[in-house]
C-alpha cells in the first residue's frame, strides 16, 4: 500500500451574512461615567483647608493649578515654596495634621527626610512644597499651567 500524502488543513471562511443581518453594527463599549466636576463641595473644601494651612504657616508664592480635564491623578495641584528645609518640613507636618483631622482620607507624603521637595497626596489635591531654587529648576507651574492644556491658545 502506498502512503497517501497529508494535505494542509484549510480553514474555511464563513459566508458573510446578507440582508438585515449584514446591516447590524457592533456598538462600542460605553464610556465610563465622567468624574464629577467639583465646583463646590468636599474637593473645594479640602483645597481651601490646604490653602489656609499653608497661609498660616507662611508658605511663599502659593499657586493653585486646575487639573480637571488635564489629568486623572487629581483635580487640583498646589505648588508653594518655603524659605528653608525646616520650614518646608513644618509646613508638611502641619498640612498632614490638618488633612488628617478632616477624617475623609489619610494624606501621604514623600520627601520629608530631605525636605528639599515634599509631595503631599491628599487625594483630590496634590501639594508640592519646594525650596525656591528647586521650584525654579522643576518649574511645575509652566508644565501643568494653562499652556499645557491647549497649545493653540498660547499662540504657538
Image (cartoon, grey):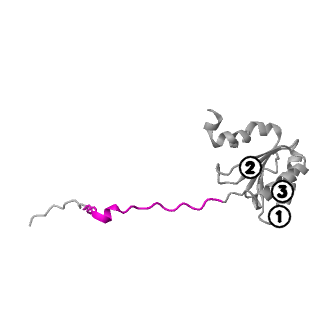
Q: Which residue is mark 3?
A: 49
Judge from the rendering whether residue 140 lies leftward or rightward of residue 132; answer left or right: left
The answer to whether mark 1 and mark 2 are in CB contact below 8 A is: no
Quadrant of image for the C terminus: top right
* Predominant SS along the magenta part: loop
Q: Are marks 3 and 2 in contact (CB under 8 Å)?
A: no
Q: Nearer the viewer, residue 30 or 106?
A: 30
Relative to the observer, which residue lies in front, 75 or 133? 75
Which numbered circle lies on residue 77?
A: 2
Locate residue 40: give its quadrant: bottom right
N-terminal of the two: label 3 or label 2? 3
The spot of residue 117 in percent (x, y) is: 79, 45
Q: Residues within 10 Å of mark 1 (few under 14, many from 20)?
A: few
Determine whether label 1 and label 3 are within 8 Å by CB: yes
Which residue corresponds to the image point at 76% horizontal and 61% vertical from the top-left? 41
Q: CA distance from mark 1 to mark 3?
A: 9 Å
Residue drawn where x is 85% and y is 59% of the image: 98
Q: Which label belongs to residue 102? A: 1
Report x, y in % for residue 119: 77, 50
Question: Does residue 27 show up magenta in the picture?
Answer: yes
Helix, strand or loop at label 2? It is: strand
Tell me the crowding category of disc 2: few under 14, some 14 to 19, or many 20 or more residues within 10 angstroms, Cα based. Answer: many
Distance between the Cα atoms at labels 3 and 2? 13 Å
Q: CA distance from mark 1 to mark 2?
A: 19 Å
From the top left corner, tell me how far across and down residue 145 is, in percent.
70, 42
Q: Position of residue 124 (x, y in %)?
A: 73, 57
Residue bounds of the magenta highlight? 11-35
Amino acid at each position: 500500500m502506498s502512503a497517501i500524502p497529508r494535505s494542509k488543513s484549510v480553514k474555511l471562511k464563513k459566508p458573510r451574512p446578507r440582508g438585515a443581518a449584514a446591516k447590524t453594527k457592533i456598538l462600542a463599549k460605553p464610556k465610563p461615567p465622567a468624574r464629577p466636576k467639583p465646583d463646590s463641595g468636599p474637593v473645594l473644601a479640602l483645597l481651601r483647608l490646604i490653602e489656609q494651612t499653608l497661609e498660616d504657616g507662611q508658605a511663599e508664592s502659593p499657586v493653585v493649578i486646575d487639573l480637571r480635564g488635564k489629568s486623572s491623578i487629581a483635580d487640583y495641584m498646589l505648588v508653594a515654596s518655603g524659605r528653608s528645609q525646616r520650614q518646608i518640613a513644618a509646613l508638611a507636618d502641619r498640612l498632614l495634621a490638618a488633612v488628617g483631622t478632616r477624617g475623609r482620607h489619610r494624606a501621604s507624603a514623600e520627601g520629608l527626610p530631605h525636605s528639599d521637595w515634599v509631595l503631599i497626596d491628599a487625594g483630590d489635591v496634590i501639594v508640592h512644597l519646594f525650596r525656591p531654587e528647586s521650584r525654579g529648576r522643576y518649574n511645575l507651574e509652566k508644565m501643568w499651567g494653562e499652556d499645557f492644556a491647549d497649545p493653540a491658545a498660547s499662540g504657538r
